[in-house]
Amino acid sequence: MRREFNLTQPQRLVALFVDLIVVACACWFLFRIPYPPLGDKGFWAYSSILAVLVGSKLVTPFYVKPIDAISYAIPALVSLMLINGWHQWSADQRWTFSLAASFSVAVISLGIANIVANSVESESAKRISNQLRVTLDLIGHPNFVYTPLILFAIFFFHAESWIEAVVICIVTGTTVWWSLGDFVVGGYHRIKRAFVDKTLKGVAGQVVAFQEPGIVLIRQQYEGDIPRNSILYVCDRHGPKKLVVALGYVGRSEGILVRTVELKTLSPASQTLIGSYPLDERAYHLNDTVLESVCLQEGIVRQAQATIVGLVAPDTSIERLHFEIVDNDELEEGRLVSAIVGTTKVMYQIVAGLTREEVVQQKNTYGYLRGQAQQVGIWDIERKKFRPCNWLPTINTPVYLERKSEYEMNAASVGHFPESNFQTTIKSVSDLVTHNTAILGILGIGKSMLAIELLERMIAEGIKVICLDLTNQYEKELKDFYDAEFEDKSIQKLQAASAKDRDAFDNDPEKGGSLPNLSAAILEDLSDFLANDNPRKLKIYNPSIFVASRQQYEPKSYMQGGAWRRAAALFSVTPVEITQIITESALTIVSREMSPTAKVCLVYEEAHSLVPEWNSVVNDGDKNATSGTARAILQGRKYGMGCLLVTQRTANVTKTILNQCNTVFAMRTFDATGKDFLANYIGRDYADALSSLPERHAVFFGKASSCENPVLIQLNDRDAFREAFRAVYPPPKLPAAGIHASRAGAEPAVAASEFDDDIPF
């Protein structure tokens, strides 16, 4: 039976003495002695009242286990049997005896049935066992078990005296069912607290243990006495007074155990605001007005305590935060959490979680979740970016969940942290190009849309872009920057060059086939495009549309029609070889002068088909072509040339270029090779998270990122970006047709081989 007052064991002992005094007063009134008389007149007290009071006050004050119910019912049944006089009793007496004994037998039977059902390994048996346990918790309480004995005693031994019957009923009601002792002791302490300290609203619970650093374990009597996130005042007899915040339940031990974490050790000024306090080790609810004043004095934001989701756990390092989760409602991968390092708020991003269990007190176990987060840094309000923190939070420090906020689209932002308005930007578009960038992920998750956004940023910075696109998507998406009519004429010239001499061979293999014509035409086309006075910023090639031939060997003589003839085999040029020609031509043109800033970016869309890894090529020609492309990219940086590599398959792209990509956007991917490669860039935790990334989400890291550490961001919506960005950087007007159709008399190009001093192979 639930009590109105939450008493400690010493206080329950005092309450027992108060109830015994009530029994003694009743005995003096009825029998002129201060104790129950021996024999039938004292049966109600010795066999019932004493058992009820001792059992309910000291043995099972909170809840009754099945074995406890049996231990109460058996003595009750034995007491009835000791006074059994069945043959001498009337029919009414037999019925009364039978009802009282039957109740005890029923409790014993239910207790045994619960024990048996609990030992059977089946779901139905477990359900029956739970139902029996709940029933026994109610009817197995000593109040219920011994009440039939008291009624039996009144009917048998006191029926002839209505005064005795009335007094015994009153004593039973005031001690067994109402508990005058609990009322007196509980009321005394409430009055005492009201007079001793006006700032205390009431006792929240008793301190069970101080677990350093910062954890206080409190026992409350009933669920709801200490609401989660409530701030309590804790009196420590051997240490300073402090404010703590309740985290949640962690077990039971003579009450419900609540774990709290220290917010602040109170200063003398705050202690003065609170005033006097009890000396015993308790947790108290403070008056709202006083609590508000103390929080203001100590710099505590009361509302922020509702966002506590965990505590800093062991194994935390500067870069990686481990925390025990106490509130799992809104947590998800990618959300930001924060912890205080010294006096500074440091942000972390959730990347993983797992389950744990530990022993809290004696045999009480506590199962919990453990989260893992990577450091993002300290938010710099003025510069609107994160800067790294060089230290770690103390163990058991509260971990707060950053509240959800609406993302406000910004032209400078490339994305934002999920469910927040913390934004990430491209620190330097020039570094994005010259130090090379990779966009990696499976099909259909937004790689090309991100690439197109980055290209718009490059064009806005005056950087010229050469797209090698097998999908024909860029022309459509970037039509405001692309003069389709003019470029179609350029493509036709290149196709005509690729068709000229397609079947011709030469004694010099380097001059055979149409490849020399195509190479010269591409060099001329790019020379015109990359000229400083050419306002066009975008050039798009589809390497698969050029059908050219190359001669690989010297001609050989053979006999035909009685005459000797000479001929050489001609081979078709692949998109990989066209990619090499375009890349080396661009390098040849820009290498006329060095540049500290970006001048041109080559975009390799479907890069696994344009610059494949050595074990993914179909012939040796593609292997040599990929090596040539990689060599040109490695040399290009000092001349302001770089690349943007977009691919679905990390494993199938040449690592010579991929390893030079100092900025990476890693999107959803499943292949183990790709994740192992990316783990070297973004860390194992982020790499493991790649398989579950939603669309338009990416792990962003590198030289061009505004964040020093890898971060998981939600990328911009294409339409929203276009509206915001073009409002600040509108697309430039395309020049009139005919401008820079050719550049006769252009300066001779400097061969790339003259600048290969930093080639690593």
Image: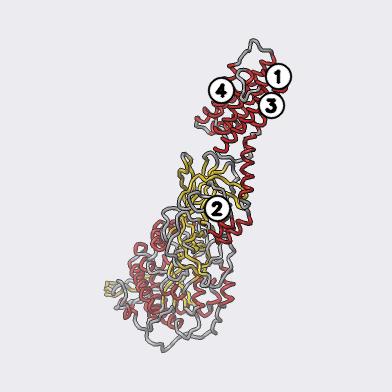
Label 1 packing within 10 angstroms: few (<14), some (14-19), many (20+): few
Kindly identify the amino acid type of the residue bearing the numbered disc 1: Ala
Q: Rounded to the nearest whole Å, what is the CA distance between mark 4 and mark 3?
A: 22 Å
Q: Earlier in the sequence, mark 4 or mark 3?
A: 4
Q: Position of residue 83 (x, y in %)?
A: 60, 16
Kindly identify the amino acid type of the residue bearing the numbered disc 4: Pro
Q: Earlier in the sequence, mark 1 or mark 2?
A: 1
Snapshot quadrant of residue 677: bottom left
Snapshot quadrant of residue 190: top right
Q: Which residue is mark 2?
A: 245
Q: Earlier in the sequence, mark 3 or mark 2?
A: 3
Q: Secondary structure at mark 3?
A: helix
Q: Which residue is mark 1?
A: 159
* Vertical position of residue 41 compared to residue 56: above or below: above
Residue toward you, 359 or 165: 165
Q: Which residue is mark 3?
A: 169
Q: Earlier in the sequence, mark 2 or mark 4?
A: 4
Circle number at residue 75:
4
Q: Earlier in the sequence, mark 3 or mark 1?
A: 1
Q: Quadrant of the N terminus?
A: top right
Is residue 91 at least partly visible in the picture?
A: yes
Quick one: which residue is furthest to the top in this view? 87
Q: Are marks 2 and 4 in contact (CB under 8 Å)?
A: no
Q: Are marks 4 and 3 in contact (CB under 8 Å)?
A: no
Q: Earlier in the sequence, mark 1 or mark 4?
A: 4
Kindly identify the amino acid type of the residue bearing the numbered disc 2: Val
